[in-house]
Image: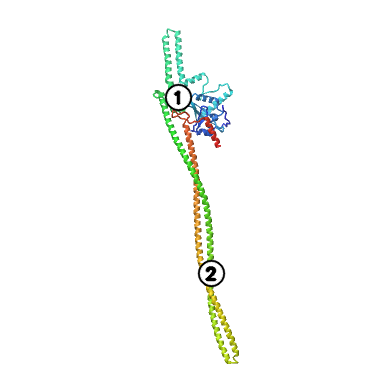
Amino acid sequence: MRTNLPITQREYPFPAGQALVSTTDLQGRILYCNPAFIEVSGYTREELLGQPHNMIRHPDMPEEAFRDMWQTIESGQPWSGLVKNRRKNGDHYWVMANVTPLLDGDRPVGYMSVRTLPDRQQVSEAETLYARMREAASRGGGGGPRLQAGRLAPQGVLARGMDRLQGDGHWRTQALCLLGVAGGWGCAQLMSIWPGRLSTTAAAALLAAGLSVGVAALIRRQNQEPLKDLLRFANRLAAGDLTGQLRAGQAGLSGRLACALNQLSVNLMAIVGDTRAGVDRLRHTSQDLAGGNRDLAERTESQASSLEQTSASMAEITETVRHSADTARDVADVARQAADVTARSTEAVREVTVTVEAIADASRRIREITQVIDGIALQTNLLALNAAVEAARAGEQGRGFGVVAGEVRQLAQRTSVAAREIKDLIEDAGLKVEAGSEQTRRACGTMEEAQAAVQRMSELVAGISAGASEQLNGISQINEAVSHMDQLTQKNAALVDELSSASETVTVQAQAVTEAVAVFRLDAAAPALAHASDAVSLRREMKARRLATA
């Protein structure tokens, strides 16, 4: 017997309300196991399928239990009993195992095991019994407790006989026949001793014995045959075969039981049929949902990639606009500075214009003064001429006065010449001052126009700077919106992944339910275990999956 190690002697709590279900082929290799079985065993589905069922056998289980189980199910009968199984990590769990042959007609093609939670009293009794069996097996020579169809077999000939009488109507009928025969034989012996007096009594006794045998045979025929049919039908139901029907019309309890079993079979067929149809629809729906989720995942991934590229482009545009806004602000500052310089230059030109105009006014005044000097020189010259005339008249006495008059005339002439030269210079300077004044006025006008242009440019640059700032704010908001959309897309992608996982889980669960209800046969032409694969190919497939996920 296979020994699985290590063991921890820690008991794993059996989940209440759960049933651990598995199916095997005739060699005991696992073809199907439900999620509860997988969870409690501690193995993965890939580690279980295709493997021998005794991989979960606990070393504390005696060989006698499995001998009785195989002997019972190979005869086509169901078996029930307490079993201690081993988990992958060495822990153990107790189950009430119910093993049923899966039949194709009258031929077993596999076995289905349904394990439920036993009560603690049963577990305690099983631990004690199995310990006695292990102790007897270690001593050798047999003689230990034995099991029969999952029950403790009685010890001794008398106990076995009483057990058969209590449990099997066939043995009760045979015992009644034997009693009748024994009574008849006793009467025959008495007739040989007292032939005269006991002839009538003996005849009656023999008749009673014959009637007893006939009645016993009739009772056996009427009771045993319907019960055998009911038992065969119940075993087929237990094996999941819902295709048969019992012959109706029988009287009594057996007839009512046959009707009830037929109704149970029909109800189960309807329930299983609806379940299969619903699971098929669920599987197709989950597959469609999985396909839609895959398409949505691809589109979401594409959208996320586009948003990522858009976000990168928006970041570049944001940086460019920010640089333009900074440049516009710098240009605005330079324009304001130029406006200030232009304003100061305009003011300086105005001051120069005022100064030139003042110089022009001074030149005009000098020209007037020069004219006065020229007039004085002319009058002085006239006076000098008059003095010279008078000196000439005076003769020798007026000679000195004549000399003075000549000098005065020469001085007046030089003054007149100088005054004319000054006048010419003043006039020339006045012309130049007027020209300069005109130029300064034109320069002042030009500077005022330049100042207005610079002010306009400053206003335009300020508008550009404000627009760039607004664009920067708008692009920043767009960038935030794109980032938010990217976050939403990432969340949507995560949600799509969750939906894909959920749809895959639903598909797996639908497949598990499909495999579970596939145990039931609704069509007599369909083979038993139609869902099961060959154990060897199944084991290879599971090994390939384990290697792929490693």
Indicate the amino acid at tag 1: Arg
Residue drawn at x 51%, y 50% as measured from the top left? 311
* Residue 198: image location, x then y, percent: 43, 9
Q: Which mark is residue 368?
A: none
Give the number of the mark in front: 1 or 2.
2
Quadrant into which the C terminus falls: top right
Element type at mark 1: helix
Q: Where residue 445 appears, x then y in whole percent?
A: 50, 68
Counting residues from the start of the chain, the first of labels 1 and 2 encountered is 1
Q: Which residue is mark 2?
A: 349
x, y percent for residue 378: 55, 84
Residue drawn at (53%, 56%) of the image: 323
Residue 471 to residue 47: above or below: below
Q: How many angstroms separate mark 1 from mark 2 (CA)?
A: 129 Å
Given residues 74 and 348, the one toward you in this image is 348
- Residue at numbered disc 1: 232
Label 1 close to label 2 by CB (< 8 Å): no
Mark 1 neighbour density, 10 Å: few (under 14) some (14–19) many (20 or more): some
Of 144 and 381, the residue lying toward us: 381
Kindly indicate the quadrant of the structure image that contains residue 7. top right
Nearer-the-camera pick, 435 or 144: 435
* Count of marks placed on residues: 2
The color scheme shown is: rainbow
